[in-house]
Amino acid sequence: MKTLFNRKSNPKEALRESKREMNQATRGLEKEIGALQLEEKKLVAEIKRTAKTGNEAATKILARQLVRLRQQIANLQ
């Protein structure tokens, strides 16, 4: 990768930059996974709440959403 004024980067700089990009990508994925897990907890609580009221149709819909959400989390991990 060429830097400012077309100066070629040495291998140490290239390695440092690639590590930095990898760490940023990792942090981004971990942040996304954490957000999905938080959403999963909320969804489970909502499923329990709708099940108590006896609303079977809404509970089924929420359960399907939960399955999709868990698949998303599994794909990211």
Image (cartoon, rainbow, N blue to C red):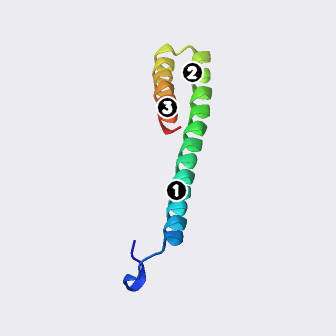
Q: Amino acid at mark 1?
A: Met
Determine the residue positioned at 56% across, 57% down.
23
**Quadrant location of residue 39?**
top right
For this rendering, which residue is in front, 27 or 39? Answer: 27
Q: Is residue 71 above or below residue 59?
A: below
Q: Picture coordinates of residue 22 (x, y %)?
A: 52, 56
Residue corresponding to mark 1: 22
Question: How far is mark 1 from mark 2, CA to CA?
Answer: 42 Å
Quarter of the figure with the N terminus = bottom left
Mark with earlier residue (1, 2): 1
Q: Is residue 75 above or below residue 19?
A: above
Residue corresponding to mark 3: 69
Discs 3, 2 touching: Cβ within 8 Å: no
SS for callout 3: helix
Q: Picture coordinates of residue 43 (x, y %)?
A: 56, 30
Q: Is residue 6 above or below residue 57?
A: below
Question: How far is mark 1 from mark 3, CA to CA?
Answer: 25 Å
Residue corresponding to mark 2: 50
Closer mark to the observer between disc 3 and disc 2: 3
Q: Amino acid at mark 2?
A: Thr
